[in-house]
């Protein structure tokens, strides 16, 4: 017999230990919980630095963070044991959106009256309500399935990342200090997997098209580990483009909140732009947009994709990623123009 909620929960824990894009995609669940249980305090558990996507969220009572991969050994284990004591007996409802061995163990130690999660045996034993894992879906309608399995149809919204007025103003000043105005187009040139990356020559050509129109000012976002790509784009553009330095998450979000549009491959920055309400063009190749770009009903979302028999392949590396290469700069510029006209 499945356990049910016998009364309105007073304390709720949501956990998604990583990754930043998935944490952003879980924000509609936070809002749905706040609407369904208005008297409950909602806490969120994730690893650092993914918690940065949750700051200023008005629906959260507390954000708890675990050390990220940079901390190992006894310090890491000590943090886990301390957290287990803190979680024990503190919650009425616990929803685990990650369901890996660590998150399922932490969920079990909450001793919540109702625990919801997925995953394979034996970690599935940590939950009272177990979500059947079929074909992988990044969002399950923004993780709302975790709530719907106990409460039925839930309120539907879209991901949101919140910024303070001060942060937004600092982002505006950062752009102005580099001679970039409000008609700027932010471009992300790199991705976590090389198969998702558009060729550097295409990026340089797109920037040239935008500069020729003299209506918008393109600039490139700095990224860790992508300096060579950015320098190649700068060389191909004859130093006509602005490249920002690498920015921490909140400053990056503040900058994006002040731009006219964002062009980005599949990844956390693409989700961030859309969660900020920024018109965003997603460049997709090997991954499935039905899973990773669930924004078909958003006016400020536009998808650039090329049909290919082998996609979606979800490969991290590819010797001939023509699903990305065959998207010409002119086609992407046309898609961007449609997005800008619509918004």
Image (spheres, helix red, strand yellow):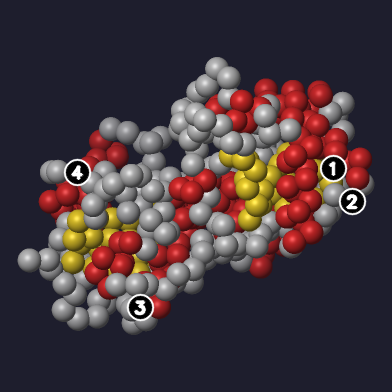
* C-beta proximity under 8 Å, tags 1 and 2: yes
Vertical placement of 46 versus 210: above or below?
below
**Quadrant in which the N terminus appears:** bottom left
Using the numbered discs, state the Cα–Cα distance from disc 4 to disc 2 in whole angstroms.
53 Å
**Residue 272 seen by the camera:** yes
Residue pointed to by mark 1: 210
Q: Secondary structure at mark 3?
A: helix
Number of numbered discs on residues: 4
Q: Residue furthest front?
A: 309
Residue pointed to by mark 2: 215
Residue pointed to by mark 3: 36
Q: Quadrant of residue 319?
A: top right
Q: Earlier in the sequence, mark 4 or mark 3?
A: 3
Using the numbered discs, state the Cα–Cα distance from disc 1 to disc 3 in whole angstroms.
46 Å
Q: Earlier in the sequence, mark 1 or mark 2?
A: 1
Using the numbered discs, state the Cα–Cα distance from disc 4 to disc 1 in whole angstroms.
49 Å
Q: Secondary structure at mark 1?
A: helix
Relative to the observer, which residue lies in front, 286 or 78? 286
> Going 62% across and 36% down the picture, which residue do you hit?
306
Q: Earlier in the sequence, mark 3 or mark 2?
A: 3
Q: Secondary structure at mark 4?
A: loop
Vertical placement of 176 versus 101: above or below?
below
> Going 23% across and 60% down the picture, which residue do you hit?
116
> Going 19% across and 81% down the picture, which residue do you hit?
7
Relative to the observer, which residue lies in front, 108 or 36? 36
Vertical placement of 267 versus 162: above or below?
above
Residue pointed to by mark 4: 120
* C-beta proximity under 8 Å, tags 4 and 1: no
The local crowd at label 4, few if under 14, some if 14 to 19, many if 20 or more residues have their Cα within 10 Å, is some
* C-beta proximity under 8 Å, tags 4 and 3: no
């Amino acid at each position: 017999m499945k356990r049910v909620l016998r009364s309105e929960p007073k304390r709720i824990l949501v956990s998604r230990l990583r990754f930043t894009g998935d944490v952003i995609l879980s924000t509609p669940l936070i809002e749905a919980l706040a609407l369904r249980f208005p008297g409950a305090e909602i806490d969120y558990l994730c690893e650092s630095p993914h918690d940065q996507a949750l700051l200023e969220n008005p629906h959260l009572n507390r954000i708890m963070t675990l050390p990220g991969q940079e901390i190992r050994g006894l310090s890491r284990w000590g943090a886990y044991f301390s957290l287990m004591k803190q979680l024990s007996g503190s919650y009425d409802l616990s929803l685990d959106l990650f369901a890996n061995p660590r998150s399922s163990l932490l969920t079990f130690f909450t001793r919540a009256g109702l625990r919801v999660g997925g995953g394979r045996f034996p970690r599935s034993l940590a939950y009272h309500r177990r979500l059947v894992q079929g074909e992988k879906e990044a969002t399950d309608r923004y993780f709302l399935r975790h709530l719907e399995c106990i409460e039925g149809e839930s309120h539907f919204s879209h991901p949101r990342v919140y910024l303070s007025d001060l942060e937004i103003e600092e982002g505006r000043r950062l752009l102005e200090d580099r001679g970039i105005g409000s008609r700027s187009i932010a471009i992300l040139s790199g991705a976590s997997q090389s198969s998702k990356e558009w060729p550097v020559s295409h990026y340089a050509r797109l920037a040239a098209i935008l500069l020729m129109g003299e209506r918008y000012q393109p600039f490139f976002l700095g990224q860790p580990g992508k300096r060579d790509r950015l320098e190649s784009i700068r060389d191909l553009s004859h130093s006509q483009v602005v490249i920002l330095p690498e920015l921490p998450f909140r400053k990056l979000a503040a900058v994006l909140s002040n731009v006219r549009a964002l062009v980005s491959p599949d990844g956390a920055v693409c989700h961030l732009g859309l969660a900020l309400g920024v018109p965003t063009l997603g460049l997709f190749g090997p991954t499935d947009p039905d899973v990773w770009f669930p924004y078909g009903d958003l006016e400020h979302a536009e998808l650039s994709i090329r049909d290919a028999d082998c996609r979606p392949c979800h490969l991290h590396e590819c010797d001939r990623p023509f699903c990305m290469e065959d998207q010409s700069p002119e086609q992407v510029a046309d898609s961007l123009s449609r997005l800008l006209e619509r918004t």
